[in-house]
Image (cartoon, rainbow, N blue to C red):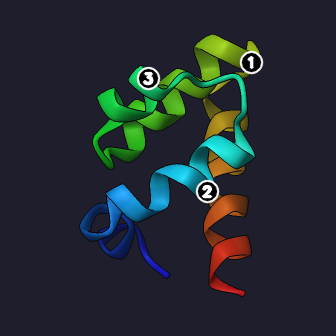
Amino acid sequence: MNWDQIVGNWKQMKGSVQERWGDLTDDEVDQVEGNREKLEGKIQEKYGKSKEEAKEEVDRFLNDISA
């Protein structure tokens, strides 16, 4: 699955995002609106991750949901 597919199915993907990053609130996930950079930024804020770590987590998420 690529990011364009996630954007197109964001309402369905929100549950998977919240399952993966449980500290993100409903409002924060809504604010992301399928934008990868916003998601990475929220992960950085909530979990104290570096930009690269957040990017790698999102990459792993994509791989996991594609498997």
The residue shown at (72%, 87%) is 67
Q: Which residue is mark 1?
A: 47
Identified at 47% across, 36% down, the residue is: 39
Question: Would you name the residue on which mark 3 appears?
Answer: 28
Residue 41 against residue 59 in the figure, above or below:
above
Q: Marks 1 and 3, how far apart in space?
A: 13 Å
What kind of residue is marked 3?
Glu
Instruction: Answer whether labels 2 and 3 touch (C-beta < 8 Å).
Output: no
Precedes in sequence: disc 2 or disc 1: 2
- Percent across and percent down for residue 4 are 30, 71
In the figure, is residue 15 to the left or right of 34? right
Q: Nearer the viewer, residue 19 or 41?
A: 19
Q: Using the numbered discs, state the Cα–Cα distance from disc 2 to disc 1 in whole angstroms.
A: 17 Å
Residue type, numbered disc 1? Tyr
Task: Report, in whole angstroms, how far the alpha carbon at label 2 lies from the one at label 3.
Answer: 14 Å
Relative vertical location of residue 20 with respect to residue 26 in this rendering, above or below: below
Neighbour tally class for label 2: few under 14, some 14-19, many 20 plus, Cα within 10 Å: some
Seen at 25% across and 69% down, the residue is: 8
Q: Which label is found at residue 16?
A: 2
